[in-house]
Image (cartoon, coloured by chain):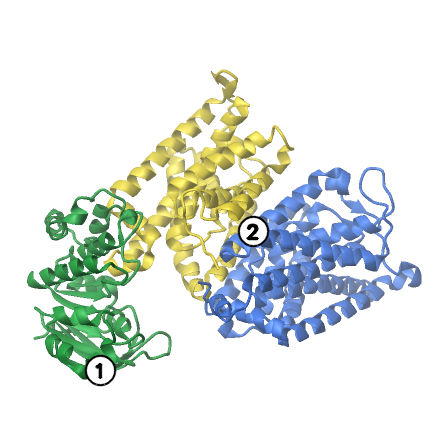
Amino acid sequence: MDVGGIVSYGVFFLVIVSVYGLLSLGLNIQWGFTRLFNIGVAGFFAVGAYTSAILTTPPVSDRLGGFDMPFVAAMVVAALLSGFVALLIGMPTLRLKEDYLAIATIGIAETIRLFFNNEAWVAHGVRGISGIPRPFQDHVPGAYYNVAYLIFMIVMVTLIFMALQKAVKSPWGRTLKAIGEDEMLAQAMGKNVVRFKMEALVLGAMIMGLAGALYAHFIQFISPEVFVPLSGTFLVWVMLIAGGSGSNKGALLGALVIWGLWSITDLITNLVPVGYAVKAGAIRVIAIAVALEVILLMRPQGLFGKEKTFTSGRKG
Amino acid sequence: MAILEVDDLIGGYNEVAILNGVSIRCESDEIVAVIGPNGAGKSTLMKSVFGLVPVTSGSIRFDGRVITGIRPNRLVRLGMSYVPQEKNIFPSLTVEENLQMGAFVRTEPMDEAMAKVFALFPFIAERRKDVSGALSGGGRQMLALGRALMLDPKLLLLDEPSAGLAPLVRDEIFEKVLEIRDSGVAVVIVEQNAKKALEMADRGYVLATGRNQAEDTGRSLLENAEIGKLYLGSN
Amino acid sequence: MPQLLANGIVFGCIIALGAIGLTLIYGILRFGNFAHGDTMSLGAYLALLFVGLRMPFLAAVGLAIGVSIVVAVLIDRYLYAYIRRAGPIILLIASVGVALFLRNVILLIWGPDLEYYSREIQFAVHILPGVRLKPYEVFIVLAAAVLILLVHLFLKKTKIGKAMRACADNLDLAEVVGIDTRRVVLWTWAVGIALAVSGGVMLGVENGLRPAMGWELLLPLFAAAILGGIGKPYGAMAGGLVIGIAQEVSAGYVSTAYKPAVAFAIMIIVLLVRPQGIFGGRRRWM
C-alpha cells in the first residue's frame, strides 16, 4: 500500500463523509430540533441526485437528458425539487402523530426508488445514469480533481454549518426547538406549529437534495441501488444519534465516526473469500444495528447531545 | 380507627409540589367531602392516595396499614376503589364487560357483585349488553361508579362525579352515593359543586393552594358564611 | 378481474394477519412496531428450519410461533422497556434497528437465495368461473379465516381478551381498575406474534422465502392498520383485505413493480381524508 493510494482513499473517504455530513445536518433540522421522524432520507437524497444528473448530462436517446444546465443551477433545482417533495409529504402528515410521518416517509422513499427503478425513460432504470459531468473539471488538472472537490465540499459543508448554527440561535430556530420539546406548549403560545414543522421538513429535505447532487457529480454514476434504505437512511440516523441529535457539530462528527466504522467493516469483510461476501455484508449491518441499540440504551443523547432532550417531549 | 388517614402529604407531578402538607381522615362509615377552588390540589390528593401521583413526604394509612407508594392495582385488592373524573369507562366494551373488568382481580364468580350493582343502578342494568361508549353522560357515570363497587371496596374515592352532568342527573348520582355510604362503604368525594357535596357529606375539608384551610361537619361548613364567601362562590 | 380479486383475497389474508398483530401491539403497547414485518420473516424462516429437521409442517409452525414469542418478549423486556423512557420516537428507531438486525441474521444464516418449504409443485385448480387457485392458496384463506375467528372469540369471550380491549381503550384506567397490565402486555405480544408468524409462513408458502420478505410487507401492513383504525383488530382485518385486493387489482392498470406504492397511496388518502380509519381508531390531532 503506497502513500499515494492511502491519500487517495482518504480524500475519497472525506468527500463521502462530507456528503453524509450534509445529510445529517438536514436530518438534524428535522429530527434534532423539531422532532420530525423522517425515515425517508434516501428519498430526498435520490431526488436531488437524479435531478442534478438529469439536468446536466448530455442528451441520450433512451432517457431524459440534454438540458445542459450549468452546475449551480442544476444543484439549486435539485435542492428545490427535494423540498417540494417534502412539502407534498408534509401536507397530509404533519398534523398527525409522529409515526404517521415516519411511515409516510418510508413510503415516499420506496416509491421514489421504485419510480427510478422502473421508469427507464426517466433515468435508465436499474442501469442508472453514468457519465455525470463534474463541475469545474476544465479548470483543475485531473490528478488533483478529487482534492479540489474535497475542498469544494468542505467549503459547502462549512457554509451550511455556519448558516445552520446561526439559524439555531435565531427566533426561528428557537421556535423549532420549542416545538420539538413540547408541541402542545408551543401551540398554546400561539405558534403556528404546522407551518414551522413544514419549514423544518422542507429545509432539511433541500439540504439532503443538495447532498444528493454533490454526490452524483463526484461519483459520476448513480442508480437506484445507491438509495436503498440501509445506506441512504438508516446510516444517516445512526450518524445523527451517535453524534447527538440537536447538535450540528454532532451531526458532522457522527457522519465521520459512523462512516469510518462502516468503511472499516467494509475493509475487513473485503478480506473474506468472495463466496461469503453477502454473508459478510450481513454481519456489517448486524454490527451497525447492534451499535445503534447499544447507543440508545447507554447514551441516547450521543456524543454532543444534551441528556435533557431525551425526556419524552409531550406531543399532546 | 379511621379507614383512611392522610398526614401532612407533600407531593405533585415532576418536581412541582401541588400538595403542601395536606391531612384528612375518613371513618369507615362516613362521606367526607373535599372542596376548594380550582388548583387547590383536590384531584391531586385523590391521585396521591391511590398511588397515581408521587408523594415526597407524609404518610397515607388505609385500614391501619401504610400504603404510601403502593401501586393502584394492589390497592384495589386491599379494598380501595377510585373513580377518575373523566375517561372513567372503557368505551368500546359493553356495560357488562366494563363491570367484569372492575372485578378483574377477583377469582371467585362475580354474579353476586354484578347483581348488586345492577340493583343499585337499574338504568345500566337495562342496558347491560350495550356498548358503553353510547351511554349518556349520566349513564357513564353510573357505570363508572358501579365498576368501582364490583370488588366490594371498603373505601371509594370519587373525583368530581357530577362534572358535566345535568342537575337532575347530578342529584340522582348524589342519591346513589348516599346509598353506597349506607351500604357500608366509606366515601371520599372531591367536588366543584361544594354546596351539594357538603349537603350530603358527614364531614368536609376545605383545601386551597395545597393546604388545609378548614375542617368541620358538612352542615357547619355549609352554614359558615366565611367559607361560603371565600370558597363556595355562587354554587 | 375475478382472478385478480381472488389473488387479492389470498394476499389480503396474509396482510390482515400481520396487520391485526400490528394494530393490537400499536393500540395496547402504544408502539408502532417497525420490526413487525421482519418478525413475520423470522417466523417463516424458523418454520423452514424445523421443517428441515423433519418436523411435520403444523408442528414446525407451532414451534416457530413459540420461539418467536419468546424472542419478542425478551426484546421487549430487555431492550424496549429501557428505551421506552426516552420517548416513543426513540422506541420506533430502536425497532427499525431490530428489524434490520433480524433481517440480516436471516441473511447471514440462510443466505439471499429463494427458499421453499417443499419442492412439490401444485397446480392451480378451477374454483369458480374465471378463478383458478392453487390448493394451498385456498388453504391460506381458510386458515386465515379460522385464525381470525379464534382471535375474535379470544377478544370477546375470554377475560384476558376483554382486558386487552380495555387496555387498548384506556391503559391508565386499566391500571386504576386493577387489571394486570403486565399480563396483558405478554398476551398482546403472544397474540400479535402468533398471527405475524402465521402470516409469514403463509407468505412463504405463497411466494417462497427471502430475507426481505417481511420488510417489503411493512408498508402494506401499516397501511392496512391505519386504514382500519389503529387499535381496532376488526379494522385491520378489513384493511388487510382492502389493501391486498387493491394491490392485486392494480396489476391490471400499472406495472406490478408499483404494488407497494398502491398501499402507500391508499394510506396517504386515508390520512388526508379520515385519519382515524374506517373504524375510528387512535389518532392524534394538533
Q: Nearer the viewer, residue B55 or B83?
A: B83
Read off the residue under disc 2. Answer: A92
Question: Which residue type carries mark 2?
Answer: Pro
Question: How many other residues sit within 10 Å of disc 2, few (<14), some (14-19) or many (≥20)?
Answer: some
Q: Which corner quadrant holds the N terminus of chain A?
A: bottom right
- Viewer can see residue B70: yes
Q: Nearer the viewer, residue C27 or A268?
A: C27
Residue at x-position 52% and y-position 48%: C271
Residue at x-position 22% and y-position 82%: B212
As helix, strand or loop, the secondary structure at mark 2 comes to helix
Q: Quadrant of residue C1?
A: top right
- Viewer can see residue C212: no
Q: Left or right: C222 with respect to B187? A: right
Residue A308 in the image: state x and y as whole percent.
49, 74
Read off the residue under disc 1. Answer: B212
Question: How many other residues sit within 10 Å of disc 1, few (<14), some (14-19) or many (≥20)?
Answer: many
- Give the colour in which the image draws chain C: yellow
Q: Chain of mark 2?
A: A
Q: Is residue A210 above or below residue A221?
A: below
- Give the colour in which the image draws chain A: blue
- Give the colour in which the image draws chain B: green
Count of number-bearing discs: 2
Question: Which residue type carries mark 1?
Answer: Asn
As helix, strand or loop, the secondary structure at mark 1 comes to strand
